[in-house]
Image (cartoon, rainbow, N blue to C red):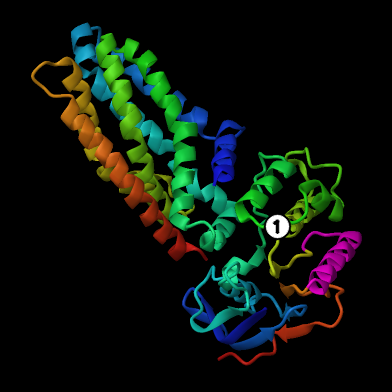
Amino acid sequence: MLALFLRDLRLSMRVGGGALTGIVFFLAVIATIPFGVGPDLNLLSRIGPAILWIGALLASLLGLDRLFQADRDDGSLDLLVLEADRHMLALTVLVKCLAHWTGSVLPLVVAAPLLGLFMNMEPLAIGATALTLLAGTPAITFIGAAGAAVAVALPRGGLLISILVLPLTIPALIFGVSASYGATEDPAPFLQPFLILVALTLFLAVIGPLGAALALRRTSD
Amino acid sequence: MRLIAENLAGERGGETVFANVEFALEDGEALIVTGPNGSGKSTLLRVVADLLPASEGKVRFEGGGEKWPTPSSACHYIGHLNAMKTALTVNENLDFWQRFAGEPALAIAEALEEVGLGHIGHLPFGYLSTGQKRRAALARLLVSRRPVWLLDEPTAGLDKASEKRLAEMMDQHLDEGGIIVAATHLPLGIEGVKSLDMGTRPHG
């Protein structure tokens, strides 16, 4: 299993991997917002956490279509399914998700504080947003895996995955953003939405890979 | 150990491609599946590997004990695709499959030597020629141990010398009590094997 994690991580770093695509997209989204919104610094810092979350959400959807399709295209997926007696398929999917998150989404979380400066955010708000992204983005990857598994047999499945997955990621977005606001705006709580966000991630860490494994079993041909 | 197919039928896209296939293979026996394109050779192998559901009948694997309880856990499957990542080196690819599949047998360098690729383990898989890619994929058979080899057109892209080497590999596997099911339309050059012609079989 560690071997699978390392292989997928290595692939995402090498040529053709998705690690850079997401981060460049994230940078492009955040860098253009101030030009669109105008030089209203108060407005920028107020919408900052929400924009960072939306940018990270969309950027992390980008590479999802290749999660299983790359393995399907070269025949590896057959062998991963074939070994299901030795390594439970849902566990294999979970490990692939974790590798995908580490390779493609974690860089977004690391870049978020820097991009927060573009949005004139206070240090506390930047820290809170980065923390909620760290806790919440795995949920997006886990749901995304189920979507990617459903669309694995389709040649241009990327758009379909986004449509399937986006509605399901809304709870993570809502609680992530409200926890980020909770850290800076006084009456709003931080801990409660943050804990719900963590619970969402843990819940989807089970449901997502199970659903994805079921879909992969059915679509193998 | 015995690999048994009973009254097996397979379908592709809702259409039956073969039916009433029966065979039983003991230790050291091989089955060569022949037939024209579209006669269901690949589908049969995928059904045996449990990658496709059988529309009728079933495949059983007996005597595997706890280590190989089902046909899919007991087999190596070499399909049309090589299941290797072009961005990783040959060594990295084989190392991954050896760890993931468990039951390590030959070391990677030895396995590459066996298929005649001893000197290119450090190259990215994408740099190899078609025949070399196929040989690297065949080296996967040697790096971890499985009693059953399911080979789908294993000689695709191989030259004469490599075909001979593959025949020796298969002979050795059979001598050690392994089981082989190979789909091909070329003679594989191994002796004393059962054969199943999908082309002349009446469709169920």
Residue A151 in view here: no
What is the quadrant of the C terminus of chain B in the image?
bottom right
The residue positioned 36% from the left and 23% from the top of the image is A29
What element does badge 1 sit on? loop
Foreground: A184 or B40? A184
Q: Read off the residue under disc 1.
A: B144
**Whole-percent x, y for residue B154 in the image:** 75, 65
Residue at (62, 56) in percent of width and height: B101
Relative to B121, is A22 on the left or the right?
A: left
B148 up-or-down from A79: above or below? below
Q: Residue at x 51, y 61 (%)?
A: A84
- Return the x and y of residue A178 as percentages of the image width and height: 18, 27
The residue range painted magenta reads B156-176
Q: Residue furthest front?
A: B66
Q: Amino acid at mark 1?
A: Ser
Q: Is residue A190 left or right of residue A215?
A: left
> In the figure, is residue A175 to the left or right of A141?
left
The location of residue B156, given as percent across then percent down, is: 77, 63
Magenta residue check for B99: no
Q: Main secondary structure of the magenta part?
A: helix
Tell me: residue B114, above or below residue B25. above
Residue A195 image point, x, y percent:
22, 33
Residue A61 quadrant: top left
Q: Quadrant of the N terminus of chain B?
A: bottom right
Circle 1 Cα neighbour tier, 10 Å, few/some/many (<14 / 14–19 / ≥20): many
Residue A62, visible in the rendered structure: yes
